[in-house]
Structures are given as structure tokens and as C-alpha cells.
Image (cartoon, coloured by chain):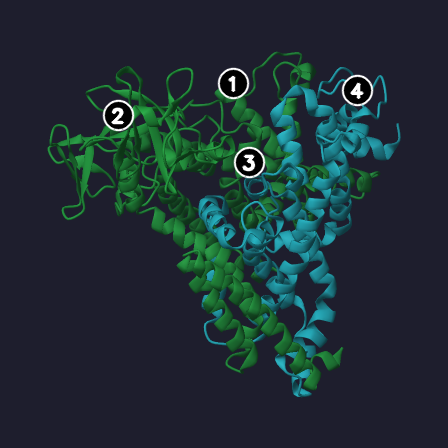
Chain colours: A green, B cyan
Amino acid sequence: MTFMLRGKFALLLKVVIVSLVSAILLMLTQSAFAQQEYVISGFLALTVLAIALTYLTKISIPLKFFIPGILLLIAFVIGPILYTVTMSGFNYKTGNIISKQEAIVQIKARAIQAAPSGESFDIKLGKLNGQPAILVSDIANLKYFVSTADSRIPVDARDVTLDPNGVAITAPNFTALTDTQMGNADTSYSNIHFKYLDKTFIALEGFDAGVVSEQALEYLPAQDEFKSLIDGAVYKDNGRGNYAQPDNKAAILEPGWRAPIWFENYTKIISDPRVRGPLVRVFIWTVVFASLTVLTTFALGLLLALALNKPIHGRRIYRSILVLPYAMPSVMSILIWGGMFNTEFGAINTLLGTHIAWFSDPNFARVAVILVNLWLGFPYFYLISSGSLQAIPSELLEAAAIDGANPRQIFRKITLPLLLQILSPLLIASFAFNFNNFNLIYLLTGGGPRNELDGQIAGATDILISYTYKIAFGAGTQDLGLASAISLIIFVLVASISLYGLRKSKVLDTFA
Amino acid sequence: MKKWLMHDSWRHIIAVGVCLFSLFPLYLVVISSFASSGSLQLTSFVPHEISFKNYHLLFNNPAIPYLTWVKNSLIIAGSVSVLSVMIGSASAFAFSRLAFKGRKTGIQLLLLVQMFPAILAISAVYVIMERVGGFAPAIGLGTKPGLLLVYLGGAMGVNIWLLKGFVDSIPAELDEAAKIDGASEVQTYWLIFVPLAAPVLAVVSLLSFIGTFNEFILARLFLVDMNNRTVAVGLQQFIGGQYSQNWGPFAAGSILASIPIVIIFLSLQKYIVSGLTAGSVKG
């Protein structure tokens, strides 16, 4: 083993590994750059530089240990966090997802309407001198012409061949598309404005018909505004990710783009009752849920620990059975419980002889959530409570007994206070964990019963994190900006709780 | 009645009661997996029949690539557990044993970063991996290596913390002696620290294995293709689709997938509890 760490062989091995890793990363850097992913490409280039500098020079010894971990952490944890922080300053939501350039292109594409003349023609897709072209048949007037993006060439009626419906299918220099070509031509042809008259063009409607259309909006790059070619209305950049009429704020063009709105997502949380109302109610339930979970799991765990604190018969068997809920993969346990609470065939209703629609009633759903979490969580507190009970010096309990305290008094005055002192950091950690217990809510009730709190998104059992997830990725309007702002607030809350717990944990050190 | 039973009866009553509570869902899954009806119904406590239909279905129905799911889970969780501990232990060793500027700030920063609710950074991770897939399809969205990278990044914070706690508890005398004998830091790490810490590293990697095996949201978002899914995602989708019909195979699949995890867990109980008291909670 030593020869791999010292001498020429070790050096060679190191150089080979570092070169290999650098080569792979450089290849990725290059292809990222080619795809215009400049941020990723830049990060990869820095990665190569950092790896080479760290392992081939003696710049810093601790870095040799840190580099792989740090790079992964930056790429997949810190990077995404910074992205989230940035997004919280934008109006990044459904309707404002794309960039401004993309939005301008799309607005132009959407601002096409049928010309007042209402004409439409039968057409045939094809190519003229290699350019996409259409052969247009004005059957009523027996007129034919070939049209491309920039020219319209009339074709004499004698030069075309007609199909039984009177639609021209061949013309000089015009090659019609084959069926397979048609299949691939869908988007490329439908985006082309085939020349008609001065201000009008033919837009495709399917593969066989074209409608004489006109552009309703014109983009003026110099002023950065859209002008209606019909009524002359002007739409300016409203600074909030949309083009809007200056005197009519509601008249906006779709789609918008993601624009910086700075702290508006945060102020909205405080000032907009439609956001604040459900959020406050979800927050209250989150705190209640996390507190009740900690309380119930700790109480049951402690009760068991006390009951089994004496070497009674079958203690080992009890212990093995009691940790089973904790040992099971939680995703599966939660799904199983979900099935057990089913109204029609669920085992809970069968057992109780009831017919309760557990997940349709807010209060029953909440009881179910707490009960399932009790099942999942009590073994943890049983294990750590029984460990801590042994840590309490027996002299204390004996002294109390000699002084005439009964078992209840000993428990209330000595055991419990000491236990709480030892376990308080873990109780706080458990609170912080359950505060963000996404899997339980998501897999058990999905936050439902649906819409219970605000008629839109928030359900009766939604906790902050599942509610935020729904805001960001839900079925309706997705507001990533607002969701990011709320996640940062959750972050601050959880971080404060955890830091408080961590500071408390020094108590543990002094006690041990 | 025997005297010990009288005296300790309250203890037995509580223990038996809670044991029943613990076992009830598990018992239900077991009898459902052997029932042919395919629902999670409690018809009676004693099963009428023992049918292997559901188990048979898992392995022979081409629409349910159960073995592929298990394989995927094992590959992903296995790689994460080994790699994350390898990378994490190096960082933990440096935090615990090496003196350098900004060490304390580094630890605090790590702790802070770890508190960010990971689920909410999902959209960012998704966008990043989507873009990576644009130029490197082999590690982009929808691939196992891509998910592996994301898991490794996410596991760093927790693992470094957990491992640092363990490393602190290993006496430093040995590596100080090695240092006096002229060993470099890298040599100390490989020749002294790793052999000493091997049992601890094994425990942490098994914990990491369980954690990854249990992960659901990222796996679901990333691995859309039926043959790329992990067991957790595959089985969930399975009952999500046609609700009451597929409980039988779901129960059978859950049991088979849970057995190794439960065995690992029970054999590691002692370490897990001490790891938990170091300040982490299993999900």
C-alpha cells in the first residue's frame, strides 16, 4: 500500500489521475461552451484549474482533502441556492418564464390575425429553387401563384396541373413535398409568412389551406415598444416583464418575460392578503403539526423507555418489534398508511367499524397525519430516551428514594427534568425536521383536502414546504419567484431553530 | 399467575399495546401480499389463503420491471454510499485534524448551507441538469449518473457533519505519532486514519445507502423512463395509477425491498442511535 503513496510510482499515478479527470472536464467545458452555456462552462473551467493547482502544486494541503467535496457542494447545493435567491427577486411565474428576446419573438408570432378581406386559399407545400414555397390556387377566380417568404410569382393557368378538386398540384420550377417531407415540415412552414400583397401574407392553416393574414403588431427596436398596426395603440415595457399600454395598465401583451421586481415577492407576502392569508394559516398548521409530532412521539417513546427500563421478560423481542416502524423505508410505510386510511376498503375504517372519509375532512386528515407520523417517529425517541435514562446517575434516584420521594415524584422532579435537559437539542432537531417533513405530507394526503384554506392551492394539511412546492410546481399558475421568496423565509426560520438547538447542545457536552 | 408478571404487568401491557400498533400496518402488508384479491383490505386477521400470485406478477409481468427497479436502486444507492463517504471522509478529516485559516467559518457555512430546504432548490437543480443534458446527454436529466451527481452534492453537507463527529471521537495520538515519524498529511490519512476509521466509515455509508434508497422526490423528477426508476418511485407510481387494483404487487414489492433495509438497520442499531444523538434525524 505504501508504494502507492510515496515515490515515483505515486507521483506518476497522481499525474495520470489528475490528467484524466482534467481531460474529461475540459471536454465538457468545451461542449458546454459550444452550446452557449457560458456559466456552466466557466464553472467547469475553474474546476479544472482548481484541481490541477491543488494536486500538482503544494499550494494548500487542506485543499487536497476538500476539493472534491467543495466542488460537488458548489455545483449542486450552493449554486441552486444562489439561483433560488436570484429568482426570489424576479416575477418568475407562468406567463413570465422566458427571456425578453424570446418574449418579443413570441409576441410577434402571436400577433397575426386574418385580414379583413377574409380570403383563404387551397395550397400545396413545396420548394422553389430550394426555398420553402407554396403553390396557391384561387379556385373561384381560376388564378394561381407561387409564394415564398419574399416574393409572389403569378403562374399562368395553362402551366399548372389540377387535381379533381381544381387545386393546382404542379407548376414550373415548383417541386411539391413528398408525404414524408410533409411530416417533418410542420413547424418550419407554419412560421413562414408567405408573400401576398403589400401588407398581407398567407399563413398556413394545416397542410392544405392558407389564410390571408396581416401582422397586428409591429416591434420598434429603437423605442423598444410594440405598435398596433390596426388602431395605432402603443405598448411599452412596463418594467415588470410585460409590454403594456401606458394609460391602460391592464392591456398587456402575452407572453411576458422574467423581469427583476426586487423585493416585491417579499412585500407581497406581508401586504397582499391573498398571499398572506393562506400562508399564515399554513404556517400555523405547520407549527402545530411539528409541535404535536414532537410531543406525541416523545411521549410515547418515553413511556416505552420507562416501561422497558427494567430487564423484564421478552424485553429484547419487544425492542426488536418496536424499532420496526423506524427500520422500514419510510416512503413505503407512508404509502401503506395512505391505503389503510382509504374510506371504502381501508383497514382503519374496517377496524373501527366506521365509514370516515379520512382525507376529505380537514380535521380527520390532520388526525391521520399526526397518527402516521407518531407511528413513524416514536421508535426514535424510544431508542434515545432509553439510552439517556441509563445516563442518569443512579445515586440521584437512590438519594431521592431515601428522602422518601415516591416513584411519581422521582419521575417528575428528577428524571423528567434531567431527560429534557439531555434531549432538548434532539427535540429541537426533530421539530426542525418535521417542520420540513415534505415526504409525509406529499405522499400521505398531498396536502389535502384540496383548496381547503384559500380555495386555490393551500390544503388543510399542507405544511409550508409542501405549500411552497405547490406554488412552484403545482397544476395551476406556477409562481417560482414567490415560491423562492417563501423558501428563503423558511430557510431563515429553520436555520434559527436549528442554530438555537445547536447552541443548546453544549448542555449535552457539559453533562456527559 | 406468576409473581413477576403481576409486578411488571403494566410494563407488559404498554409494550404489547405499542407492539401491536407497530405491527398492524406491517402485518396488513404481509397478508395483502399473499392474498389474491389485490387490495389492502382487512377482511380478517387470519388469512384465508396463501397465494404467491403477487410475487409471481412482480417477476414475470413485463409491464412491471421490478427487478430493474431494484437494480437501479442498488446501483444508485450503492454508488452514493461509497463515493459520498470517500469524498466526505476526506473533508471531515481535514476539518477535524488539520489546522488552517477559516476552518471554523467553513464548518459554520457548511451547517448553514445544509439547513436550506433542499426540496425548494429542486427547480434550480432541475434547470441546471436540463442544461447539462443539452451538451452532455450522458449525465443530464433523466440519467442515473446525473441523479448520482445531484445526490452526491446533496449528501456532502450531512455526511461531512456526521463523519466529523465520528472523526473527533477517534483519538488523535496515533496520527500525531505518524506525523512525528515524518508522515505527510496524505499518508496519515490513508495509512493511519482510514484503517482506524473503517468501521465508522462502513456505518456511515450504510446509513447513506438507506437514506438514498428512501429518497423519493428527486428520483421521481429525474427518472421518468419506466426502466430507469428506483424501487420507491416505481412502486409509488404503480398504486398511484390504478388505485385499489395494484396493492397486492405493491405490498409484495415493498416487503421484498424493505427486508434488506430492515436487516441492515437492525444490525446497525447501536451505531445508528449514537449517530442520531450526534444530531441528525432519519427521514
Question: Residue under circle 2?
Answer: A212
Q: Are marks 2 and 1 on the same chain?
A: yes
Tell me if label 3 and label 4 are in contact, CB under 8 Å.
no
From where the camera sits, is residue A406 visible? Answer: no
Q: Are marks 3 and 4 on the same chain?
A: no
Give the Cα distance between marks 1 and 3.
21 Å
* Between discs 3 and 2, the one toward the N terminus: 2
Name the amino acid, label 1.
Answer: Ser
The nearer-to-camera label among 2 and 1 is 2
Question: Residue under circle 1?
Answer: A360
Whether B173 is drawn above or below A310: the answer is below
Side (left or right) of A170 relative to A200 = right
Identify the chain of the residue marked 2, using the numbered disc in the image.
Answer: A
* Between discs 1 and 3, the one toward the N terminus: 3
Q: Residue at x 65, y 52 (%)?
A: B208
Element at label 2: strand
Tell me if label 1 and label 3 are in contact, CB under 8 Å.
no
Tell me if label 4 and label 1 are in contact, CB under 8 Å.
no
Whether A97 is drawn above or below A42: the answer is above
Q: How many marks?
A: 4
Element at label 4: loop
Element at label 3: helix
Name the amino acid, label 3.
Answer: Thr
Identify the chain of the residue marked 1, using the numbered disc in the image.
Answer: A
Q: Which mark is residue A293?
A: 3
Of B256 and A304, nearer the camera is B256
From where the camera sits, is residue A13 visible? Answer: yes
